[in-house]
Amino acid sequence: MRTTMIRVCQVLALLALAVCVSVPIVACVGKLSFSEYLRWFNLASLLWFLTAPLWIVPSLFGKEWEKAGRLAKLRRRP
């Protein structure tokens, strides 16, 4: 269960990071208004800061999370 949650957090964090990078570019092109830009960027930033610690540093949340983090990293490699 924890391993699955870490993998889900990994995907969500990477998607949020992609949105954080792409939204300013889209706003500079003129496709988004400032209020839409703020909404998307704030949502993506919040999602990033909520999911990234579980994926990047699972040892912050105890021994069980650290073990699940190691398992998630081992299963990712071919």
Image (spheres, rainbow, N blue to C red):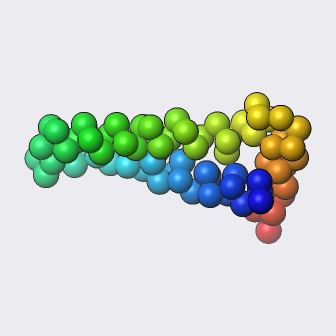
28 on left or right of 5: left
Write down the quadrant of residue 59 in the picture. Answer: top right
Question: In the image, what residue occupies the spot 52% across and 35% down?
Answer: 49
Question: In the image, what residue occupies the spot 15% across and 37% down?
Answer: 34
Q: Is residue 27 visible?
A: no
Q: Position of residue 36 (x, y in %)?
A: 19, 44
Write down the quadrant of residue 11 in the picture. Answer: bottom right
Q: Residue furthest bottom?
A: 78
6 on left or right of 44: right
Q: Residue furthest top?
A: 60
Q: Is residue 68 visible?
A: yes
Q: Is residue 74 above or below residue 16?
A: below
Q: Position of residue 44 (x, y in %)?
A: 40, 44
Question: In the image, what residue occupies the spot 81% across and 43% down?
Answer: 65
Quadrant containing the N terminus is: bottom right
Which residue is nearer to you in this view: 22 or 34?
Answer: 34
Quadrant containing the C terminus is: bottom right
Question: In the image, what residue occupies the spot 84% across and 55% down?
Answer: 71
Q: How many marks?
A: 0
